[in-house]
Image (cartoon, grey):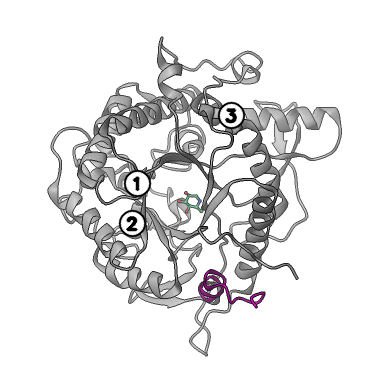
């Protein structure tokens, strides 16, 4: 059995996001977000659930951080809720919101855990959606203003910054498929959102550099780099189209490579680019964040809008119905290392796995424990990929388990449990699952393969 050897300075982290864990949506001067509004829409979220209470981390962060420390984690990736910081989207800053994240960071630092903050993990103030949200160009300056407030108010306590989490989901799930807030189904609005997110990212990084702050700043993508279902030419081409549309339109502009022609020319998709935008987007970032869960095969399919579709696979499924494909992470990381080589003059941009995890129907057993064997197996296999690639010289610097807690899984509500710590939503009791102990042992270096 393979050993999980990691460099001494490898960052072991765990992650959450504001709307998924904080709760207290009507407290601390927080404004309304698109997820509050979306969750009220009949049928939008499973069983009509919402993030009003979630894991109540707004009140229980001390208890959560103490447990994180006990397990040995060295970094916590959380997100800042825009409607807590600027409840009306633009304008007046809410001191109570700022104070919450300061307290959170201070508590982390008390245990020597670093604070990795995502500026935007999907909870847009509803007032801004009323003006067109990410599909309206006005959002770009609003985001720049909000990001600047985050840097100014929290710059002295955040150790690592991410501008956005998963632009693909913001643009496509939110504005094309309509399965996430704000629930819009309009291709051009989604295409506009892609460009505005890219531009907002660039403006935020540019503003960050002017602050003189030294903490590294990057962005988290969830690249989709599917494999062709067969070795036929048509399927290979389909896989490339899928990658271009779902991944390259986000990554390429940020790395200074512009929008891929296979999308702008071959698919005739028009991004609302104005003069100077592409230069603004291509700001030097310090690292790349990657969220990886699974990979599906795609094949040519003339019947669909973009001439490809996802094909059945044979791997075991998680409770999300997602196949377990650690080889997909390997393919993806190799591809990212390749395309980012030489970007911004650095030989290879550092990569952090900012999310990786497994949903399972976890229940506390009669022995008071949760034996989440499949999750451990999933994590073990993905960590093994990272360990191997590090040995080959791919600069993977850290790994954040998704998620620290079971939480509000967006349109799935509370039915899907991704946590390494179980949450009983009736009494908010936390119970570390076996996977949490697996992390404790792996981080401490005396896991199954230790000496
Ligand atoms: C990625 C998202 O960033 C996170 O919010 C979500 O819960 C996980 N994927 C699992 O779906």
Q: Secondary structure at mark 3?
A: loop
Residue 113, quarter of picture: bottom left
Report, in whole angstroms, how far the alpha carbon at label 2 lies from the one at label 1: 8 Å
Residue 325 visible, this orientation: no
Front position among marks 3 and 2: 3
Percent of width and height locating residue 106: 25, 60
Percent of width and height locating residue 438: 56, 74
Give the magenta part as a residue range: 436-451
Report, in whole angstroms, how far the alpha carbon at label 1 lies from the one at label 3: 39 Å
Report, in whole angstroms, how far the alpha carbon at label 3 lies from the one at label 2: 42 Å
Along the horizontal axis of the image, is 395 left or right of 226? left
Percent of width and height locating residue 107: 27, 64
| Mark toward the start of the polypeptide (1 vs 3) | 1
Query: Label 3 crowding class (10 Å Cα cut-off): few <14, some 14-19, many 20+?
Result: few
Residue, disc 2: 51
> Would you place residue 224 above or below residue 264 in this image?
below
Q: Is residue 448 magenta?
A: yes
Q: Secondary structure at mark 2?
A: loop
Residue, disc 1: 35
Q: Secondary structure at mark 1?
A: helix
Residue 196, quarter of picture: top left
Residue, disc 3: 342
Residue with the most extreme right position: 232
Disc 3 under 8 Å from ligand 1? The reply is no
């Amino acid at each position: 059995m393979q050993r999980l050897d990691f460099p001494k300075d490898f960052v072991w982290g765990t992650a959450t996001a504001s709307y998924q864990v904080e709760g207290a949506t009507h407290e601390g001067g927080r404004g309304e977000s698109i997820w509050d509004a979306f969750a009220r829409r009949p049928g939008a979220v499973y069983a009509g659930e919402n993030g009003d209470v979630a894991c109540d981390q707004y009140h229980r962060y001390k208890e959560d951080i103490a447990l994180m420390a006990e397990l040995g984690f060295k970094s916590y990736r959380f997100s800042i809720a825009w409607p807590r910081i600027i409840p009306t989207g633009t304008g007046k800053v809410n001191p109570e919101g700022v104070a919450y994240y300061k307290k959170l960071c201070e508590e982390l630092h008390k245990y020597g855990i670093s604070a990795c903050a995502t500026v935007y993990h999907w909870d847009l103030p509803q007032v801004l959606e009323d003006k067109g949200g990410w599909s309206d160009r006005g959002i770009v300056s609003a985001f720049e203003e909000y990001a600047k407030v985050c840097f100014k108010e929290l710059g002295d306590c955040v150790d690592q910054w991410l501008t956005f989490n998963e632009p693909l989901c913001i643009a496509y799930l939110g504005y094309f498929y309509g399965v996430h807030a704000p629930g819009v189904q309009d291709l051009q609005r989604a295409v506009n959102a892609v460009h505005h997110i890219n531009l907002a990212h660039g403006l935020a990084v540019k503003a960050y550099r002017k602050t003189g702050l030294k903490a590294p700043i990057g962005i988290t993508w969830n690249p989709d780099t599917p494999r062709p279902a067969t070795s036929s030419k048509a399927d290979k081409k389909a896989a490339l189209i899928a990658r271009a549309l779902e991944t390259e339109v986000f990554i390429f502009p940020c790395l200074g490579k512009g929008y891929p022609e296979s999308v702008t020319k071959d698919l005739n998709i028009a991004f609302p680019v104005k003069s100077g935008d592409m230069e603004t987007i291509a700001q030097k970032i310090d690292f790349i964040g990657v969220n990886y869960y699974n990979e599906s095969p795609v094949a040519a399919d003339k019947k669909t809008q973009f001439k490809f579709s996802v094909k059945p696979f044979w791997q075991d499924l998680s409770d999300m119905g997602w196949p377990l494909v650690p080889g997909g992470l390997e393919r993806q990381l190799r591809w990212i290392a390749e395309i980012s080589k030489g970007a911004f003059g650095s030989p290879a941009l550092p990569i952090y796995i900012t999310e990786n995890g497994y949903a399972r129907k976890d229940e506390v057993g009669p022995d008071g424990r949760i034996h989440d064997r499949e999750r451990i197996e999933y994590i073990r296999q993905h960590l093994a990929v990272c360990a191997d690639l590090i040995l080959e010289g791919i600069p993977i610097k850290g790994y954040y388990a998704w998620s620290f807690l079971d939480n509000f899984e967006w349109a799935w509500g509370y039915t899907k449990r991704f946590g390494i710590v179980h949450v009983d939503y009736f009494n908010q009791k936390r119970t570390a699952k076996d996977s949490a102990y697996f992390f404790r042992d792996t981080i401490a270096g005396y896991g199954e393969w230790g000496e």
